[in-house]
Amino acid sequence: MTLKDYLGIIDNGLKQLFDRKAVDPAKARRPLIRGIDRTLAQFAAGSPGTPTGWYRIRNGVVALTVKVGSDTFTINGAATNHLPADRFAEFLAACALRSTRARSTPSWPTTATAMLR
């Protein structure tokens, strides 16, 4: 093949991909894992939650909104999810376990729903 035949593989649209800053998956997960640990500790201590925290408890129901930095994780298609208070610690433990296991995988889920799979 001649050099002219190889010119077809040039794709200058790849510049954006080339210029993108690499993401360290373990570093990206760290705030989520810290938030899960903090929320578990607050819940275990009997805190009903705070308006600026991840959860609030009322009438035996937890309203959970997972916030990491300025982003809100969408879980099950919603920004805020409701679950029975007596299953909340179990749910958080499952999230922590899944996000810890995810440390060994190269990709980071785009939503918490993907994280829980």
Image: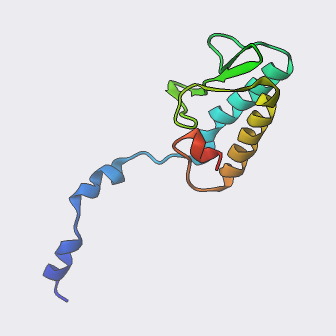
Name the one closer to the observer, 31 or 109. Answer: 109
Which residue is drawn at the image coordinates 23% and 63% (left, top)?
11
Report x, y in % for residue 36.
Answer: 71, 31
Q: Residue furthest right?
A: 45
Compare residues 104 and 48 and report the one nearer the observer: 48
Q: Residue furthest front?
A: 59
| 50 shown above or below 22 | above
Q: Position of residue 101 (x, y in %)?
A: 72, 51
Give the quadrant of residue 29: top right
Residue 68 x, y percent position in the rendering: 58, 28
Residue drawn at 29 percent across, 57 percent down: 14
Q: Is residue 5 left or right of residue 65?
A: left
Q: With 4 as the anchor, is 84 left or right in this view? A: right
The number of numbered discs placed on residues in the rendered structure image is: 0
Q: Residue furthest bottom?
A: 1
Check the picture and name the quadrant holding the N terminus. bottom left
Above or below for 46 versus 14? above
Q: How is the image coloured?
A: rainbow
Name the residue at the top extreme: 51
Which one is nearer the viewer's eye here, 115 or 69? 115
The residue located at (55%, 25%) in the rendering is 69
In this view, 48 is above or below 94: above
Q: Position of residue 84 (x, y in %)?
A: 75, 26
